[in-house]
Image: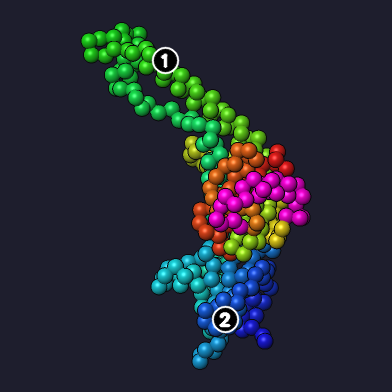
C-alpha cells in the first residue's frame, strides 16, 4: 500500500538530498509509517509522516533543530503541518528549516568537549585559587614585594603558608602543562567519535579539535574539523582500526551497565583509563541524540 507521506519524502530527498535511514510503524494516529531522514552522511535531520482525515492528507515535518514561536508543547513547536505539500515545502524553504550540518552537530560537539574536559579532570586541579589565604597574608606579601617590612603588629607574613601556596601553584602549573600536552596529542590529532542511537545504529567519524580565536576577545574556543565524515553503519566491520578497542571495551565492561547502545557504548559519562576511551550521554538516546565514545587514534 502506498504511504501518504511518500510525496513529502520524495520532495525532501530531491530538494535537500535527505535520505531515509529508518522507518517506524508506531505512528499513534494511524497505521501509516514515520520516516526518519538524514543528511547523505547519515546524520539525522527530521522525521516526517502523513495521514488522511476528512479534510484530506495532513503532511507533517518534525525536527529538533527548528522550533516555531508558538505551540502547545515542545513537540508541537517542533512540528510543521499542512494539508498542501507545496505550502509545507514553501514554509520549510522560507524559514530555512533544514539545518546546516554545523547546527545539527552543535550538541554533539558540546558533548565531545564535556568528555574531553572530564578526562582532563582526572589529571587534577590546575586552578590557582587563594582559598586559605587571609587578606592579612596578602597584605604582608604586598608590603614585602614593595620593599617594606612585611611584619607589623597586625600583619605577620606566615612563611609556611606562603611555601604551601607556592607548592600548590607550581603543582597547578605542572598539571596545566600535562593537560595541554594531553589535548594536543590525543585530540588535536585526529581521533574517532562513535555515536549510538536508540535504534542501535552507529555513526562513525574521524575528527580533530581545532582552536578558534574569537574576534575582539581574549578567549579561545574550540571546534572540530572532520578528517573523515560521518558514516552510518550497523556494525564496525567497515572500521577494522577501531574494532579491536571496542571489542576489548565490551569484554571488560559487559554486565556493568543497564543501558548499552550499539552493542558496546554504555549510557554513562566516564573516562576509562585502562583503554583511554571516554563515553558521554547527556540523555537517553533517541534517533536524534546519541551515546558517544571518543577513541584517540593512539589506541587504534
240 is within the stretch colored magenta: yes
Placement of 23 over or under 254, stated as above or below: below
| Most foreground residue, 168 or 82 | 168
Q: Which residue is mark 2?
A: 50
The picture places residue 177, in percent across and down from the top left corner, at: 56, 28
Quarter of the rendering occupied by the C terminus: top right
Residue 181 disc label: none
The residue shown at (73%, 46%) is 244
- Residue 200 occupies quadrant: bottom right
The picture places residue 292, in percent across and down from the top left corner, at: 60, 52
Determine if residue 69 is in view.
yes
Q: CA distance from mark 1 to mark 2?
A: 72 Å
The residue shown at (42%, 15%) is 163
| Most foreground residue, 89 or 135 | 135
Callout 2 environment at 10 Å: few (<14), some (14 to 19), or many (20+)? many
Q: Which residue is mark 1?
A: 163
Task: Give the residues in magenta.
Answer: 236-261
The residue shown at (35%, 15%) is 141
Amino acid at each position: 500500500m502506498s504511504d501518504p507521506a511518500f510525496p513529502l519524502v520524495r520532495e525532501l530527498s530531491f530538494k535537500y538530498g535527505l535520505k531515509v535511514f529508518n522507518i517506524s510503524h508506531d505512528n499513534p494516529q494511524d497505521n501509516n509509517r514515520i520516516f526518519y531522514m538524514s543528511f547523505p552522511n547519515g546524520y539525522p535531520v527530521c522525521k516526517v509522516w502523513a495521514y488522511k482525515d476528512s479534510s484530506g492528507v495532513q503532511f507533517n515535518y518534525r525536527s529538533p533543530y527548528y522550533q516555531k514561536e508558538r505551540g502547545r508543547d515542545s513537540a508541537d513547536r517542533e512540528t510543521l503541518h499542512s494539508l498542501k505539500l507545496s505550502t509545507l515545502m514553501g514554509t520549510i524553504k522560507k524559514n530555512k528549516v533544514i539545518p546546516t550540518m554545523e547546527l545539527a552537530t552543535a550538541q554533539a560537539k558540546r558533548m565531545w568537549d564535556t568528555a574531553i574536559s572530564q578526562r582532563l579532570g582526572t589529571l587534577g586541579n590546575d586552578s590557582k585559587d587563594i582559598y586559605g589565604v587571609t587578606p592579612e597574608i596578602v597584605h604582608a606579601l604586598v608590603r614585602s614585594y614593595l620593599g617594606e617590612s612585611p611584619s607589623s603588629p597586625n600583619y605577620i607574613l606566615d612563611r609556611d603558608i606562603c611555601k604551601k601556596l607556592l607548592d600548590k601553584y607550581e603543582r597547578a602549573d605542572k598539571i596545566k602543562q600535562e593537560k595541554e600536552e594531553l589535548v594536543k596529542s590525543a585530540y588535536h590529532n585526529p581521533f574517532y567519535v562513535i555515536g549510538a542511537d536508540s535504534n542501535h545504529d552507529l555513526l562513525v567519524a574521524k575528527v580533530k579539535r581545532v582552536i578558534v580565536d574569537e574576534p575582539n576577545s581574549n578567549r579561545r574556543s574550540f571546534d572540530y574539523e572532520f578528517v573523515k565524515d560521518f558514516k552510518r553503519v550497523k556494525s564496525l566491520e567497515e572500521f577494522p582500526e577501531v574494532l579491536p578497542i571496542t571489542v576489548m571495551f565490551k569484554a571488560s565492561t559487559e554486565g556493568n551497565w543497564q543501558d548499552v547502545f550499539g552493542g558496546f557504548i554504555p549510557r554513562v559519562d566516564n573516562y576509562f583509563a585502562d583503554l583511554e576511551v571516554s563515553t558521554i550521554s547527556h540523555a537517553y538516546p533517541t534517533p536524534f541524540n546519541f551515546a558517544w565514545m571518543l577513541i584517540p587514534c593512539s589506541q587504534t
